[in-house]
């Protein structure tokens, strides 16, 4: 993305802001949904993140890449919503008992379905770095910057996240050799 | 099992989040409404976001086939098929609550479980209204209305969207949702005050060329109380198909 677009947004150019939105919105919605595990919360988070971007764009240093700055705002919004909705997430877990196939009927392959379920079962501490790396494609260094944590901590959380994913998959696919 | 296949993980995350992408236009519409684009500088005042919803839970829409010709007979049969009461655990405003809910088999051809210690069901000619037994006159309306209409979900959705747009400053077309019921959904709110009215519509295909229209109405402060209770009721909403 060119720096000029950010400059235009800084000057209050609505079209430029809309262009910025169009560049980032889709991936932001995906990321927010994978983090919050909820389509509606994802919309909330992305909406608020872009409003914050618009209101705070002047504090963004154009010599740095925009994406990590934006995703830091987005992840913070997701965390805020997760914290706010933590009580209700418990309810949904109770009702769903962890596995509800109807929710995933649009997926093309059972293995993707199980893998996504496994990601959703990860704790935030592991899920968020996994999402940022494998959905958004951020480097470990960028993830460290977004989450304000040490790069070694990122590596550790990613490693443990992958380990847990393997364990969840073993449980989910247990007795289902056909998908193995 | 060996290492996680990173390519498959990327693809699973993409597939699993596909449905969020459809909200792109709706989110932009709200951002546009929220931000006062001025010629000089960015607006200082941030207008709060509204809730698209709070619960993430799936519901399989179960269609029940019976051989019964008459509605009442069908309702009786349905009553026999489902537990008359259930105990559910729900977290309301931070507290875990154990609630007994009772089966309600409606002549509108659906079943639902209702906490009748708190809510009453008012049956009107073409619709059922679930509302608190005790109402505070100074607070906005709290209710959940369920009715069937002879319109396909897409047609009914157009009418609802038009109606909401004429009444609410913020309306979000959530598109297809799977929670708390499977159908088309709209969310509207008239402000960010504790007493701001919130309306959620769900349009569920009745599989006979018509639709169930479910309208939840409450106020912002009641989102984690009545809003959650209504959602939990809807998770047990099932259509009776003759």
Image: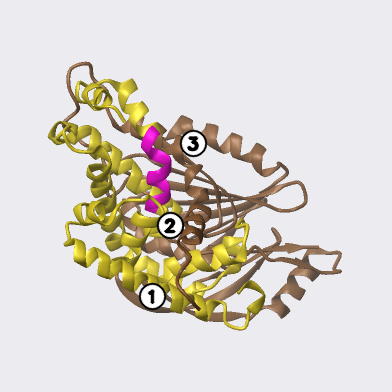
Chain colours: A yellow, B brown
Q: Is residue B73 magenta?
A: no
The quadrant where residue B156 appears:
top right
Real-space Cα separation, disc 2 to disc 1, in angstroms: 24 Å
The quadrant of the rendering that contains the C terminus of chain B is bottom right
For the stretch drawn in magenta, the main secondary structure is helix
Real-space Cα separation, disc 3 to disc 2, in angstroms: 24 Å
Q: Which residue is mark 1?
A: A163
Please provide percent x and percent y for residue B68.
85, 68
Tell me the SS state at disc 2: loop
Magenta segment boundaries in residue numbering: A23-32
Tell me the SS state at disc 3: helix
Crowding around mark 3 (Cα neighbors within 10 Å: few <14, some 14 to 19, many 20+) is many
Q: Which residue is mark 3?
A: B164
Residue at 32% in and 66% down: A158
Please provide percent x and percent y for residue A169.
50, 75
Real-space Cα separation, disc 3 to disc 1, in angstroms: 48 Å
Pinpoint the chain carrying mark 3: B
């Amino acid at each position: 993305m060119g720096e000029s677009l950010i400059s235009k947004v800084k000057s209050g150019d609505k079209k430029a802001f809309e262009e910025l939105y169009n560049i980032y919105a889709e991936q932001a919605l995906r990321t927010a949904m994978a983090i919050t595990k909820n389509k509606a919360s994802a919309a909330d988070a992305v909406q608020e993140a872009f409003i914050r971007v618009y209101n705070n764009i002047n504090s963004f240093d154009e010599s740095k890449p925009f994406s990590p700055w934006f995703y830091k705002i987005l992840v913070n919004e997701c965390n805020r919503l997760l914290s706010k909705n933590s009580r209700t997430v418990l309810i949904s877990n109770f009702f769903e008992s962890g596995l509800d196939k109807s929710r995933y009927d649009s997926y093309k392959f059972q293995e993707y379905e199980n893998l996504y379920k496994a990601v959703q079962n990860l704790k935030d501490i592991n899920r968020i770095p996994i999402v940022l790396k494998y959905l958004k494609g951020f480097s470990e260094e960028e993830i460290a910057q977004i989450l304000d944590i040490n790069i070694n901590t990122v590596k550790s959380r990613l490693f443990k996240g992958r380990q847990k994913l393997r364990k969840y998959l073993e449980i989910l696919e247990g007795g289902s050799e056909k998908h193995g | 099992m060996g290492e996680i296949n990173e390519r498959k993980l990327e693809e699973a995350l993409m597939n699993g989040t596909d449905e969020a992408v459809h909200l792109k236009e709706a989110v932009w519409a709200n951002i546009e409404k929220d931000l006062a684009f001025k010629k000089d500088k960015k607006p200082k005042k941030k207008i709060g976001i509204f809730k698209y919803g709070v619960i993430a839970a799936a519901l399989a829409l179960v269609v029940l086939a019976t051989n019964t010709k008459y509605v009442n007979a069908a309702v009786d049969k349905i009553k026999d098929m489902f537990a008359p009461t259930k105990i559910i655990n729900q977290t309301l405003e931070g507290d875990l609550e154990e609630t007994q809910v009772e089966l309600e088999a409606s002549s509108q051809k659906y079943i639902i479980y209702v906490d009748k210690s708190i809510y009453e069901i008012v049956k009107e000619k073409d619709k059922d209204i679930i509302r608190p037994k005790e109402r505070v006159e100074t607070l906005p309306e709290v209710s959940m209305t369920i009715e069937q209409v002879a319109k396909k979900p897409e047609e009914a959705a157009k009418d609802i969207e038009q109606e909401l747009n004429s009444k609410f400053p913020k309306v979000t077309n959530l598109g297809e949702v799977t929670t708390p019921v499977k159908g088309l959904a709209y969310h509207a709110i008239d402000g960010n005050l504790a007493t701001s009215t919130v309306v959620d519509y769900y349009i569920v295909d009745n599989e006979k060329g018509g639709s169930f229209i479910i309208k939840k109405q409450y106020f912002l402060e009641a989102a984690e109380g009545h809003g959650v209770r209504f959602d939990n009721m809807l998770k047990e909403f099932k259509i009776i198909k003759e």
